[in-house]
Image (tube, coloured by chain):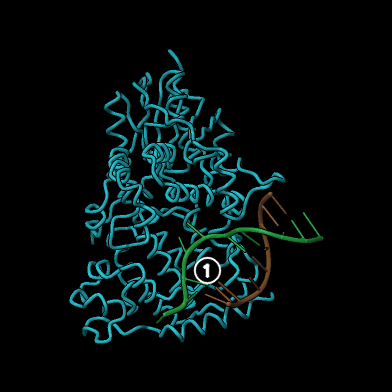
Chain colours: A cyan, B green, C brown
Amino acid sequence: MTTPSIVWLRRDLRLADQAAFLAAARKGPVIPVYVLDDEIAQHRRMGAASRWWLHHSLASLAADLQALGSRLILRRGRCHEELAAIRRETGARTVHALHHYEPWWRNAERAVEQQFDLQLHHGNYLAPPGTVTTGSGGLYKIYTPFWRALQQHLPPPTPLAPPARLEAPAYWPASERLEDWKLRPTRPDWSGGLSDTWSPGEEGGRARLAQFVVRAQRYEQRRNLPALPGTAMLSPHLHFGEVSPAQVWHAVADQGGSVDTFLGELGWRDYAQNIILQFPAYGGRNGKAQFDALAWRTGPEAEADLIAWQRGQTGYPIVDAGMRELWHTGWMHNRVRMIVASFLIKHLLIDWRRGEQWFWDTLVDADYAQNSVNWQWSAGSGVDANMFVRIMAPLTQSAKFEAADYIRRWVPELAGLSDAEIHDPVRRPPRYPRPIIAHAEGRARALAAFAAIKGE
DNA sequence: GACAACTTGTC
DNA sequence: ACAAGTTGT
């Protein structure tokens, strides 16, 4: 009887283009394992929206594995301990997995390596993070030169076919029941808007990709218009690895036409991962040290403003629409993410980490690298230096990107207002708040606070 | 060490 | 037109 090998699943919950499954299947029987490890990342415990997604993604993968005559083994605990227990039960000595670059996953890999022949495969990025290097051999900090260099590594490999069959081991280790993990909310169940919006799992990801492919040529024109379905909405599927970036790249690039802007966004995903590789603490640590001295607002007034922002009650229609879209669907249009982030950081002068934490808990696509890099980009605190303090003007942005219908959808109190008035309603319906800060005042306060740290 | 360039702007 | 520092070549 051949010894089985373990496929250790993390954010790679798919069967197609999954090198770990193929490598394990070639060797003999396969034991697919997912370990829910809530201690692994301490304050980076998976957020509530992500847990909802995880539940459905695991259910989908378990069904797909069953159709191949296999199973998904679920365990709760420390990864290396659970895998070691499975080793004792089954004799498995090899673990196949895909590379992940969050600092906690890299630590977990070191622990697993102590006890197993751990074989890590690539496939969740266009090019393996760390392999795109500058002329002098270092890693890039600036997006554009990174993207130019990444293109030398493209196209990514042709996606791998899913395994035709997976041999079952002689003995199946015990599995916990997904229901018992209570990943879905109860009392109250706020997940209705999530299930109306999303189909987690590999099949849902494939469908979402197919819908986008026919719109890909219009991506550049439409991607900044939140009222239209211009973006791919693939981020949660990519985060959980239900689709691979190579699958996306090939599906989109094969369409021809002008899809470079979209492919550049996939490149941004690789870029963020490369930043995390260089700066593992980036989610909590300013890339520029002088930002440690920035006089962020704290105290009861700032806390009240934070709550107004979280609830979509700032009195800025575009900001409130975005925050309510996030709460309802677990996702927010990218252009609006920039606007609400700029508003929190600049107008409210609240530490970008508070916004990052909220996104971490509420986004179905919450991703350590993306979230950290993008919030630091908005704050200007990152290593990807932008020269000037950029303070987005919410009303200008709202009009420029034609957000009227988007606002009507998410801020129903304003649905009766005209296109001209809705961005900055003069006569406010009684249930809609006044702006919590005037644009000019917030802008001046931010400029002063940012100027104060310039020379540090 | 010179020089070009920097994801998303400015009510 | 403008802001005006750092990275990468």
Q: Please report the residue visible at 72 percent of the width from the left and 46 percent of the height from the top.
A: A136
Foreground: A73 or A69? A69
Horizontal side of A376 relative to A315 (left or right) equals right
Horizontal side of B6 relative to A340 (left or right) equals right
Q: Can residue A269 be seen in this view?
A: yes
Subunit under mark 1: A
Quadrant in which the N terminus of chain A is drawn:
top left
Using the image, determine if residue A427 lies above or below residue A13: below
- Disc 1 packing (10 Å; few <14; some 14–19; many ≥20): many
Quadrant in which the C terminus of chain A is drawn:
bottom right
Q: Mark 1 highlights which residue?
A: A379
Q: Where is residue A10 in the image (x, y as percent from the top left)?
A: 43, 41
Foreground: A311 or A134? A134
Foreground: A126 or A2? A126
Q: Please report the residue visible at 48 percent of the width from the left and 36 percent of the height from the top.
A: A123
Q: Position of residue A389 (x, y in %)?
A: 55, 73
Using the image, determine if residue C4 lies above or below residue A425: above
Horizontal side of A177 relative to A385 (left or right) equals left
Check disc 1 and report its element: helix, strand or loop: helix
**Amino acid on which disc 1 is placed:** Ala
Q: Where is residue A40 in the image (x, y as percent from the top left)?
A: 49, 49
Using the image, determine if residue A151 lies above or below residue A295: above
